[in-house]
Amino acid sequence: MSYTTLDLKRDGQVAWLTLNRPDALNALNSTMVTELRDYFSGLAADRDTRIVVLRGAGRAFCAGLDLKENASGDGGTGSVQAALRGQRRISELVMMMRRAPQPIIAGVHGAACGGGFALALAADVRIAGESTRMNAAFIRIGLSACDVGVSYFLPRLVGASVAAELLLTGRFINAQRSLATGLVSEVVPDGEMEAAVRRLVDDMLLTSPVGLRLTKECLNASIDAGSLEQVIAMEDRNQVLCTQTNDFREGVLAFLQKRRPQYTEN
């Protein structure tokens, strides 16, 4: 498949996958979701790729879902079944990343919000540039903060209290606090991001291919205290229910109009 929103380059056994909509801060539109699904779904059969590096072009990693693609917030005009199918197309991305046998390194800089935050959390290792600002943006537009696996990954990375703070408020977490809470492994100047990622890649390439894949598989199984599928099912149900409310439409419009939302539903 030839990608239009992704830039894929190979360097030996390493794939450098760049979200490539810099003018939109790499926001996830329907095309990018389709292309990410295509790429991640093929990794299980890809024996030539040992490591995947995920990063964003331009000023940001990924600003989240492209709300301008659905500026009216028309979640209530279609069926619940259709909304659930659309929701699952996005949420399955993190399951694909988790199931991929290759370690995925996220090189995060600038904004990593909403769905971009979810992609960063689903990676196996995160290295942050000094400009990094991440948040669960969903709660700020009338949705639940628990979306696309975030409520599964985040407490496992930073603990219940910090996760609750970030999810219940939509607050941003910067690079230094991300390092202090264990959300990222390293913080470097933005200009040194690629060099830092390459150092990590080089160390991973020192391991055996089967050892690296089995280590990822075993580590994920050991960390899991429950089922990702169960969490995704609950998140998707709540998210679809939220899309049926007027407050969701108000939240989207307020975000696009850069004003404080006026919620009316309790």
Image: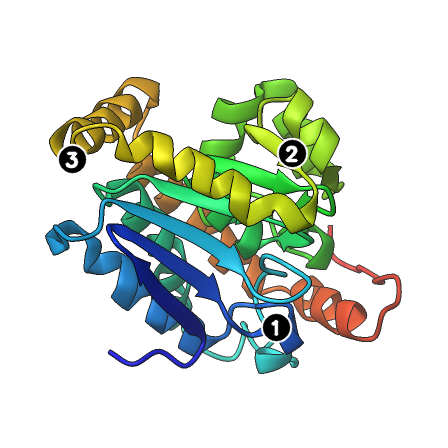
Q: Which kind of residue does numbered mark 3 sit on?
A: Pro
Q: Tag 3: Cα neighbours inside 10 Å, few (<14), some, or many (≥20)?
A: some
Residue topped by disc 2: 187
Of the numbered discs in the image, which one, if any, rests on residue 209? 3
Q: Tag 2: Cα neighbours inside 10 Å, few (<14), some, or many (≥20)?
A: many
- Above or below, 183 against 59 in this view is above
**Quick one: SS at disc 3?**
helix
Residue 127, given in percent of the width and then of the height, sits at 55, 38
Q: Are marks 3 and 2 in contact (CB under 8 Å)?
A: no
- Above or below, 252 against 113 in this view is below
Q: Residue at x 57, y 19 (%)?
A: 159
Residue 201 in view in this figure? yes
- Above or below, 8 against 13 in this view is below
Q: Residue at x 42, y 71 (%)?
A: 6
Q: Which kind of residue does numbered mark 2 sit on?
A: Val
Q: Are marks 1 and 3 in contact (CB under 8 Å)?
A: no
Residue topped by disc 1: 22
Which image quarter holds the N terminus? Answer: bottom left
Residue 177, given in percent of the width and then of the height, sits at 72, 28
Residue 124 in view in this figure? no
Q: CA distance from mark 1 to mark 3?
A: 33 Å
Q: Of callouts 3 and 2, which one flags the residue occurring earlier in the amino acid sequence?
A: 2
